[in-house]
Image (cartoon, rainbow, N blue to C red):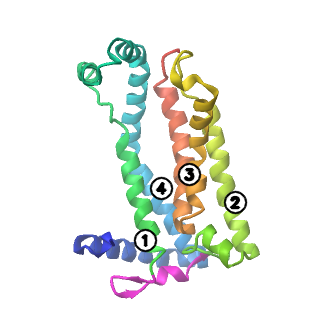
Amino acid sequence: MDIFAIPPLTLLLDAAYSALLALSTLLEPVAGSAAAALAVVLVTLVVRGLLIPVGVSQAKAEQLRARLAPRLRTLQQRHGNDRERLQRETMALYRDEQASPLAGCLPLAVQAAVVGILYTLFLRTEIAGHPNALLTHDLFGAPLGESLFAAAGAGLDAPTALVWAAVLAVIVVVADITRRVFRPQVPADGPLATPAMLGVVNGLHYLTAAFAVFVPLAAALYLVVTVTWTLVQRWALRRRYPLPAA
C-alpha cells in the first residue's frame, strides 16, 4: 500500500518537494549542481535545531533512568515472576519521579518521518503527478536519488564510489566514537553483561551504516549530518547532565 496516495500525505509530500526544490534553486548560485545536497544538509540542521529542547529532555531522562536503575533492578528481583505486578510497580516508580519511561522517543519518531519523506522524494520519478526534478541533482557526480546498493548493481563509477565511501566512513567513525564514549552502564551480574550480549549492544551502533546502503544518497546525507549532530549534542548534554557513578 502506498501511504502517500492518501490525499493529506500526497499534499504533504508535494509541499516538501516544492520547498526542497525552491531551496535548491536558491542555493544553485553558491553550490551549483550540489545545491540539492546542500539543501538536504540545511533541512537536517533545521530539524535537529528544532529538536534541541527535546534533546535536553532526553538527556534529563537518561540521567533519571541511570539514577533509578538500582531501584528498577530491585523491583525486577522482587517481582520478576509476576509481570503485571512488575509493570505496575515500575510505572508507579516513574510516576513518583514525575517521569516517563518513554521520554526521548520523539526525536526518533521525527527523524524517522524526515528520512521517510526524503527517501520518497528521491525515489519517485513523479511527485503529485509532475516529473521529479530533484532526481536530476547529484553530489560530485553521484546521483542523489540512487542508493549504494542500486549503484553497485548497475556498476559503480569512480565519483559515486568516492562519495559513498566518504558517507559511510563518516557514519562508521561517528558510530565507533559513540560506542567508545557512551558505553552503557551494565550491571556485572545482569543478562547484558555476557560477552555475546555486549557484542550485540556494540553492534547496534553500526546499524545506521548498514541502513544507509539501501537508501538514496540524499537520505544517507541526512543520516551523516544527524549522527554527527547527535554525537556532539549528546557529548555536550552529558557534561551538563552527568550520569551518577555506576
Q: Tell me the amino acid under the disc marked 2.
A: Ala
Q: How many residues crowd mark 1 within 10 Å: few (<14), some (14–19), many (20+)?
A: some
Label placed on residue 208: 3
127 inside magenta stretch: yes
Give the Cα distance between marks 4 and 2: 19 Å
Residue carrying label 1: 120
Mark drawn on residue 166: 2
Tell me, yes or no, whether the highlighted magenta stretch contains residue 122. Answer: no
Tell me the magenta residue range: 125-138
User: Which badge, 3 or 4, comes first in the chain's sequence?
Assistant: 4
In the rendered image, the vertical position of residue 190 relative to residue 141, given as above or below? above
**Image location (x, y in percent) of residue 100:** 29, 30
Q: Nearer the viewer, residue 15 or 211?
A: 211
Residue 31 is labelled as none
Amino acid found under the numbered disc labelled 1: Thr
Q: Are marks 4 and 2 in contact (CB under 8 Å)?
A: no
Which mark is first along the chain, 2 or 4? Answer: 4
Q: In front: mark 2 or mark 3?
A: 3
**In the picture provided, is 195 more to the left or to the right than 192?**
right
Q: On the picture, is 35 further left or further right than 6?
A: right
